[in-house]
Image (cartoon, rainbow, N blue to C red):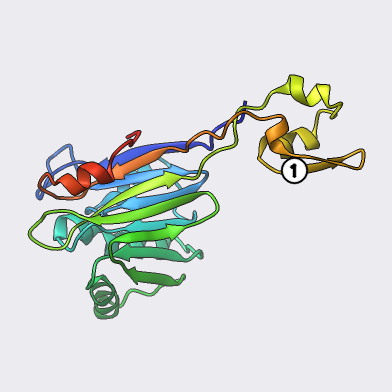
């Protein structure tokens, strides 16, 4: 059987507009295959990252649902801490119109010196990112200002691997099995062996939904349909 890529969802902060003695402001972190995906950045989340021993020089993408302080004020502190810890990997930031000016103006006014590049993208509804392994979509919610909900959707995974089928084709265990398990065809004894000859039907990837602040809306019900979390 093909193993799923390791994924964790960590609630870094769960309070509303005001933190409590035990709850920081809102931030959700998905860690997938060593890459960090932040959804909103409440104040002080870098301390939580340190407590959880999550490194700050990993591939990182940050998504901001909307331009309200309890969802974005922690972003400047996070960026500054990462820079002081000599991070050297770029950070990709996605959010609504105005986020680029907010970040660049405050970084300049506060004299924050960066050791890495910031790639800032102001987004609209629809596909935000597409890679060979996943897609991230945005959909507007119903809030007092533009708020985006997000879905993180993994691509379909190859089907279950059947060793008996591979052995019947006399394919030796090892690298060739691994390639077939990962959905890649191989050449063996001058014949092309396709993954479909030893695998079951493709299996769906996981779907994670993050709403940000919103009133209930029918379009978000559809947007979050079939989410695993």
Q: Taking the image as drawn, is residue 87 in sight? A: yes
Q: Quick one: which residue is furthest to the top in this view?
A: 164
User: What secondary structure is found at the residue carrying circle 1?
Assistant: loop
Q: Residue at x 12, y 45 (%)?
A: 16
Residue 187: x, y in percent? 84, 43
Whether residue 97 sits left or right of residue 164 in the image: it is left
Compared to 186, does 105 lie above or below? below
Q: Taking the image as drawn, is residue 25 in sight? A: no
Q: Quick one: which residue is furthest to the left in this view?
A: 144
Residue 19: x, y in percent? 13, 46
Q: Quadrant of the N terminus?
A: top right
Whether residue 191 sits left or right of residue 67 in the image: it is right
Compared to 63, does 106 lie above or below? below
Residue 142: x, y in percent? 12, 54
Q: Residue at x 33, y 35 (%)?
A: 226
Compared to 78, does 23 lie above or below? above
Q: Quadrant of the C terminus?
A: top left
Q: Quick one: which residue is furthest to the right in this view?
A: 189
* Residue indicated by mark 1: 185
Residue 140: x, y in percent? 21, 57
Question: For residue 71, what is the image quadrant?
Answer: bottom left
Whether residue 45 sits left or right of residue 52 in the image: it is left
Q: Nearer the viewer, residue 46 or 182?
A: 182
Q: Count the marks.
A: 1
Q: Nearer the viewer, residue 65 or 104?
A: 65
Within 10 Å of disc 1 (Cα), the crowding (few <14, some 14-19, many 20+) is: some
Q: Residue at x 47, y 49 (%)?
A: 134
Whether residue 35 sits left or right of residue 28 in the image: it is right
Q: Residue at x 12, y 41 (%)?
A: 20
């Amino acid at each position: 059987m093909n193993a799923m890529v390791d994924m964790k969802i960590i609630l870094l902060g769960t309070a509303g507009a005001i933190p409590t003695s035990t709850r920081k402001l809102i931030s959700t972190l998905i860690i997938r295959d060593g890459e960090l995906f932040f959804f909103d950045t409440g104040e002080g989340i870098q301390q939580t990252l340190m407590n959880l021993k999550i490194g700050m020089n990993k591939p990182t993408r940050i998504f901001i649902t909307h331009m309200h302080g309890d969802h974005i004020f922690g972003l400047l502190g996070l960026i500054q801490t990462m820079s002081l810890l000599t991070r050297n990997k770029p950070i990709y930031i996605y959010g609504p119109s105005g986020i680029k000016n907010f970040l660049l103006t405050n970084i300049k006014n506060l004299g924050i010196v960066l050791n890495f590049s910031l790639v800032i993208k102001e987004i609209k509804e629809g596909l935000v990112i597409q890679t060979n392994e996943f897609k991230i979509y945005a959909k507007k919610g119903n809030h007092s200002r533009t708020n985006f909900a997000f879905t993180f959707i993994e691509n379909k995974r190859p089907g279950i691997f059947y060793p008996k089928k591979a052995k019947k084709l006399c394919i030796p265990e090892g690298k060739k099995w691994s390639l077939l398990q990962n959905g890649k065809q191989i050449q063996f004894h001058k014949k092309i062996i396709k993954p479909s000859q030893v695998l079951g039907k493709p299996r769906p990837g996981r779907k994670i939904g993050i709403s940000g602040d919103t009133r209930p809306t029918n379009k978000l019900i559809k947007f979050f349909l079939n989410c695993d979390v």
